[in-house]
Amino acid sequence: MFVGGEFYADARWLLDEASISTGKMIFLNGGKACLIVIADYLRAHGVEKILLPAYLCPTIVNTLEGRGLACAYYPIRPDFSIDLDALAHKSAGYQAVYFINYFGFSQPAPARGFLADLRQKGVLVIEDNAQAGFVEQSTGDFIFNSVRKLAAFNGGYLSTALDVTASIEKYRGLPNRHLPLIREYRERLADYLYRGAGSHTELEQMLRLAETYYESDLVVEGDPQERRQIERLDWKGIKQARRQNYAYLLSLIAGVEELAPVFPALQEDNMPLGLPVYVRGISRDWLLDELGNAGIGLTIHWDELLRDPRLNGDPAAVGMASQILTLVIDQRTSHKQMDYLVQTCLDCIRKAKGKPAR
């Protein structure tokens, strides 16, 4: 049995007609493209430095620094909420502040209120919903998401009342080397998983090359075919499936002290990316490897932080990144797969503690 891993081509969630209204949003190539446009706008309007959460993916920093912004950081608590006292102190003198709705969970109301107050004072607020999808109640001057985190399509939607036309036009017409390769990868991955066709080694090589293109190329323009498919996805059904899976998996790990949920309850209407846990009492990295050997592909958000000298000076962030592991609850995942995931975790925990597997 396989669980998790990269998204593969899957038409089961496509509807005949568009399911969401995106008329006021700007469709771009992905989350990175949204960041490029935002960063270029900031630089064109005299912003030289930006304040970011200390817990984030280093590729965000790479993109912002690559567009000429200097980055500084404010602390994030282990429950992924903003340390508002620290942010209040650090935000003085900054014209732009960035925040993340981690794993599809919105920041608490006091944080959203504080960020709204910053906007009233003229600070530009960037809201990162890359892990959250389409969020109805937003706070930022710039709000963006990343569809490839949630489904097998590429694109990102940017919402802003500011004129970013010039920032988009300068990248118009650049070749997209990533897209045809990742499309082929997703088709071949489906063939490999369901029909045993092809080579896992070749798939890994293809994915690495595709990700190299994604990281290195400055592609901003979104692909019309991807947009049509994204907007035909059954987003209501996807959200419902993810929420139901989250609740089911949460019930399965209740009482497993080695797997401590970061978010022990869903929010009223959020769409979770996954079910993040802190791995306690055993090696997280060892557990990840053991699960991989059992056909379970999980993600660490974000272990790259541990090796990045720009980010690994924050003890709280390092502690979080050393223990976190995201369990899968996406729309592809069945109860049987989650049962297998949890039973394999329990067997690994018993093995780590010198007890026989059940």
Image (cartoon, rainbow, N blue to C red):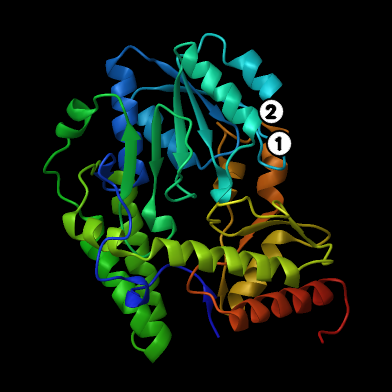
Residue 81 position within the rendered picture, expressed as x and y whole percent measured from the top left: 66, 36
8 above or below 176?
below
Residue name at image x 63 percent, y 69 percent: 289
Disc 1 marks a residue whose amino acid type is Arg
Q: Where 251 falls versus 308 (above or below)?
A: below
Q: Earlier in the sequence, mark 2 or mark 1?
A: 1
Can you say which quadrant of the picture contains the C terminus? Answer: bottom right
Residue 313 appears in view: no
Closer to the camera, 241 or 129?
241
**Residue holding disc 2:** 83
Q: Quadrant of residue 342?
A: bottom right
Q: Residue furthest bottom?
A: 195
Task: Kindly indicate whether the residue at mark 1 contacts the one at mark 2 (C-beta within 8 angstroms).
Answer: yes
| Dot label at residue 355 | none
- Dot 1 corresponds to which residue? 77
- Residue drawn at (17%, 36%), measured in percent from left and top? 171
Residue 152: % across, % down: 36, 65
In this picture, residue 211 sits left or right of residue 343: left
Could you tell me the amino acid type at mark 2? Asp
